[in-house]
């Protein structure tokens, strides 16, 4: 079955990525930390592995999740996909197959930004499950700093652009703009972070599979140099307070707008702990908090309210 063969390929790829990401966490965090690897099964079809590290010296919480699941789409998901132009049968259940990897790293030091990436393959098999009705890739990588270091942001975007240019020079500007629009916290009038790349409904060709694999492979090069430069910088309680306030915005986006979170929460027998592993260990809300315009926090807000080109 084509779906099964593709799923096996994605599962093998994501399993290797999981092992490599967990190794990064252990090397970079140092000292003691709580570390958990949790394999899970979904009775409706499929399963996955979630790796979580918390209370490390560098990463306060870091999680990687791989999943290969199948079953029938919930009605809410069908409606959402139809709104994006997907052609589904008018009646009856819609089978699906999905495989992907997602990762979120929330650092302890406010000078170190949070990173998120997610890459996935989604397929709708035909009624006899011997061929595909439609299949596509989606995902991206984005950065959420708490204090703006333009050199770090430019490095991050430069690595992503190189990964995109290897497949299509039009990918980076297109997916960078898409990322800025997607990670917009509409009710706040600001972006979650300084963007990166985001795409969806990318045709499931061999070329695009190689592109997605390349994007996965460059996460370390885009992020770890930033961690090493910033992880030892001193910070005070006020900077930590600001970091937790910005994490509150992170939570708001994930629970209100994120497609993957909403899809997971609407899917029967979903693995809730894995779906919510992207949330930070700690977050904070204060009534009508506004930083001073000329402060470092205010400078970050200018960028979040009006995204800019970094390259």
Image (cartoon, rainbow, N blue to C red):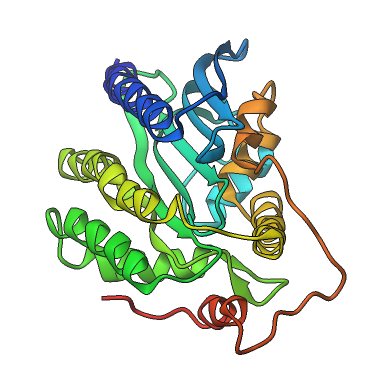
Taking depth in this image into account, of 21 and 10 the one nearest to the observer is 21
Position of 266 with respect to 301 (left or right) is right
Residue 288 in which image quadrant? bottom right
Q: Residue at x 79, y 74 (%)?
A: 289
- Is residue 145 among what the camera can see? yes
Residue extending furthest toward the left: 166
Q: Residue at x 55, y 32 (%)?
A: 56
Spot occupied by residue 245 in the image (x, y as percentages of width and height): 72, 61
Residue 6 in which image quadrant? top left
Spot occupied by residue 253 in the image (x, y as percentages of width and height): 65, 57
Taking depth in this image into account, of 303 and 119 the one nearest to the observer is 303
- Is residue 77 among what the camera can see? no
Q: Residue at x 55, y 26 (%)?
A: 52
Residue extending furthest toward the bottom: 294
Position of 221 with respect to 75 (left or right) is left
Spot occupied by residue 132 in the image (x, y as percentages of width and height): 33, 30
């Amino acid at each position: 079955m084509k779906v099964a063969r593709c799923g096996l390929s994605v599962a093998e790829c994501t399993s290797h990525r999981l092992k490599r990401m967990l190794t990064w966490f252990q090397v970079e965090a140092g000292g003691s930390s709580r570390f958990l690897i949790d394999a899970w099964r979904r009775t409706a079809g499929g399963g996955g592995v979630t790796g979580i590290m918390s209370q490390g010296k560098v990463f306060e919480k870091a999680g990687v999740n791989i999943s290969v699941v199948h079953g029938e789409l919930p009605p809410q998901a069908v409606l959402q996909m139809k709104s994006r132009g997907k052609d589904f049968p008018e009646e009856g259940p819609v089978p699906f197959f999905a495989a992907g990897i997602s990762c979120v790293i929330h650092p302890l030091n406010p000078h170190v930004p949070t990173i998120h990436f997610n890459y996935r393959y989604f397929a709708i098999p035909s009624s006899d499950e011997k061929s595909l009705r439609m299949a596509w890739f989606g995902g991206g990588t984005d950065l959420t700093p708490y204090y703006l270091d333009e050199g770090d942001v430019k490095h991050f975007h430069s690595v992503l652009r190189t990964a995109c240019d290897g497949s299509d020079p039009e990918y980076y500007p297109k997916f960078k703009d898409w990322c800025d629009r997607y990670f917009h916290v509409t009710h706040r009038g600001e972006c979650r972070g300084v963007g990166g790349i985001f795409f969806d409904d990318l045709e499931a060709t061999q070329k695009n599979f190689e592109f997605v694999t390349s994007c996965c492979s460059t996460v370390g090069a885009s992020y770890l140099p930033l961690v090493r430069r910033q992880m030892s910088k001193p910070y005070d309680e006020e900077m930590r307070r600001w970091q937790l306030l910005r994490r509150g915005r992170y939570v708001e986006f994930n629970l209100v707008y994120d497609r993957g979170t909403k899809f997971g929460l609407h899917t029967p027998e979903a693995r809730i702990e894995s779906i919510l592993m992207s949330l930070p260990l700690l977050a904070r809300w204060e009534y009508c908090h506004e930083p001073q315009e000329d402060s470092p926090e205010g400078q970050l807000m200018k960028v979040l309210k009006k995204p800019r080109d970094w390259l």
